[in-house]
Amino acid sequence: MKALIGKKIGMTHIFDEKGTVVPVTVVEAGPCTVVQVKTPEVDGYSAVQLGFGLDKRINKPLAGHVKSSGAVPKVLREFDLVEVAPEGEEAVTIKVGDVIGVDTFEVGQLLAATGTSKGKGFAGTVKRHNFTTGPKTHGSHNYRAPGSIGAGYPQHVMKGMRMAGHMGAEKVTVKNLEIISIDKENNTLAIKGAIPGPRKGIVVLRG
């Protein structure tokens, strides 16, 4: 299972062996503690629940849930567990209390990063859906207006109509991001390209 929970630190750039500038996003990935292992016999499916960070204040139900792992995580995420190891690799047994770090990934490996995009608040159709503005001339009344939202029949707005509304703050996944470097001492990954979300935002990495 190659998956970690991390925190986005920010963006910078580094130079590769050829001297080319590579834009990267630095992510503090792990260490993550295995809080729960779900099995088909008990839960009906196979999965692993990982915890990340340190929560200073924790309620009693959550404290009882994570007690056996010995951790007090601030963020919990669940990942599907593949019980059959890939060809040429040994099966790894995961149990509660195990700690997973950045060494589970390799330089050059491709990742899928999932985060919550930045919230933009209430936005119009030009900003939210890239609508074209109307003519900015004398007498024009449709410079940034949305235009028609339906016909005379049926007498209601159809579902999916692109209109003004809440923009951003959505779950976004970006695939095929390459790991450029790994810092095991500081538990950080330098990943090529941009990752959704603001600085200090929670990011889920899947290999």
Image (tube, helix red, strand yellow):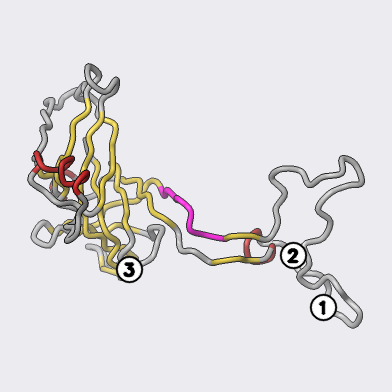
Outermost residue to the top: 41
Query: Which numbered disc, 3 or 2, marks the residue that appears first in the sequence?
Result: 3
The correct choice, above or below, for 6 with respect to 127 in the image is above
**Residue 103, x across and y down, in percent:** 13, 47
- Asked if marks 1 and 3 touch (Cβ < 8 Å), the reply is no
In the picture of the structure, the residue carrying the numbered disc 1 is 136
Most foreground residue, 33 or 182:
33
Q: Residue at x 14, y 27 (%)?
A: 89
Which disc number belongs to residue 161? none
Residue named by callout 2: 132
Task: Indicate the secondary structure of the residue bearing disc 2.
Answer: loop
- Residue at the spot 30% in from the left edge and 43% down from the top edge: 206
Query: Distance of mark 3 from mark 2, alpha carbons?
Result: 31 Å
| Distance from the alpha carbon under mark 1 to that under mark 3 | 38 Å
In this picture, residue 50 sits left or right of residue 199 = left
User: What segment is highlighted magenta in the picture?
Assistant: 167-174
Helix, strand or loop under label 1: loop
Q: Is residue 106 visible?
A: no
Q: Are marks 3 and 2 in contact (CB under 8 Å)?
A: no
Q: Quarter of the image holding residue 153?
A: top right
Amino acid type, label 1: Lys
